[in-house]
Amino acid sequence: MRRPLNCRALWLMVMAMNSVPSTARPFTAAGFRRGFIAALPFIISNGIAGAVMGVAYRGLGLGFGASVLFSTVVYSATAQAVTLGLWALPPPVAAMMLACAATNARYLVMSAHLRQLFPDMPRRLMLPILLILGDASWLMTVAEAEKGRRDAGYLLGSSVPMAIGWIGGTALGYATPLTPHGPVAIAAAFLPLAFIASLLPTQWRGLRSLLPWTIAAIVGVAVAGTLGQSWAMLIGGGVGTLASALRGDDV
Amino acid sequence: MSDWPVYAAILAVGIAAYAMRAGGFLAIGAMPQTGLVPRLLRLAPGNLFVAFAAAGILEGGWPSLIGCAGAVAAMAATKKEWAALAAGFAGAAIAASLL
């Protein structure tokens, strides 16, 4: 769930794959068990990152219930870190929704591929599973299908430990009896930004990223100084994205 | 202040998140497979993150700048998110205590 994929690799992967033929039941309990066991380590890794998010939410002044709800219904480190950076009272809802959609647009591609993979899965079963769709569980499920083990049970099974880790980690992090002061408090407030900064190397496309990223940064800073932080990412990132597309950085 | 605007905002963001998760599954036939839209989708994340980071550094000053540098360096070296978060946290804390 947490670590976004290299989008180019993801896209190429999706474009290269054809629909997997329906050869067996699309959802099995055995698949659920296999997926659950395979994803158990994510309880720890997602739990650590979720705990960081919980600490950040508490530092922001959100209540425990609101913090856990955030990690439950949004369930995306990227989107949560970005919306955390935009947080204000009253919350800038439109900007936050737009930012969430922009940072999570990759899920459109991933769930479209799941439709190709599981054309025989009823929507009433698949749509609830998609609530906890994550990058890693999608990748694991696609890899299983390529081995001839197409199973939406595996998707659900691998998604559950990831969700337990993330949501449980948020709750534990929030409840941790630590009250940072001084430099540690400043560093704790920095953590949402650290989430985003840590993703930058995964998006780097070599030197061709330099110019559009510079443009994005300059416009972002200019917008932050005029229209405010809420719009800096969307406008700066939008201009940078257009520059990338016009230069053909993805071809 | 009542908490309902907070919960409403969280639910609104949750709806946006779920729309992305379910949207491709529900509307695969309507999604363009080639052209400008898919190109923008795959080019957008890096640019959005850079603009977000730049604005955040502007607001947070030296601790944020040094923390970001630490997080990026650690992620590039280790490819481990937890290591990047730890390095960013440490860098920001040290910078805040020294600067």
Image (cartoon, grey):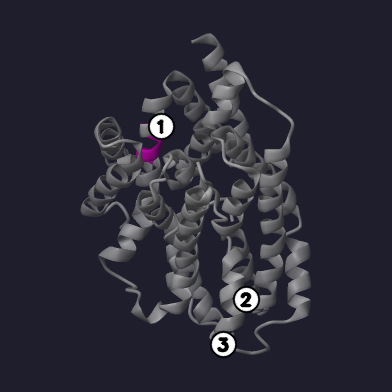
Report the predominant secondary structure element of the magenta stretch.
helix
Q: x, y (%) of residue A175? A: 72, 39
Q: Chain of mark 2?
A: A
Q: x, y (%) of residue A26? A: 65, 84
Q: Residue at x 61, y 56 (%)?
A: A72
Q: x, y (%) of residue A130? A: 57, 70
Read off the residue under disc 1.
Answer: B56
- Say which mark, if any, is on residue A21: 3
Q: Secondary structure at mark 2?
A: helix
Query: Which image quadrant: the C terminus of chain A?
Result: bottom left
User: Disc 1 marks which amino acid?
Assistant: Gly
Read off the residue under disc 2.
Answer: A145
Residue mark closest to the camera, 2 vs 1: 1
Left or right, A68 with reference to B95? right
First of labels 2, 3 by sequence position: 3
Disc 2 versus disc 3: distance between alpha carbons?
A: 10 Å
Q: Secondary structure at mark 3?
A: loop
Q: Are marks 2 and 3 on the same chain?
A: yes
- Say which mark, if any, is on residue A159: none
Disc 2 versus disc 1: distance between alpha carbons?
A: 41 Å
Q: x, y (%) of residue A214? A: 29, 35
Q: Report if residue B52 lies within the magenta region.
A: yes
A246, above or below B72, in the image:
below
The image quarter in which residue A40 lies: bottom right
User: Disc 2 marks which amino acid?
Assistant: Ala
- Circle 1 residues within 10 Å: few <14, some 14–19, many ≥20: many
Q: Report if residue B86 lies within the magenta region.
A: no
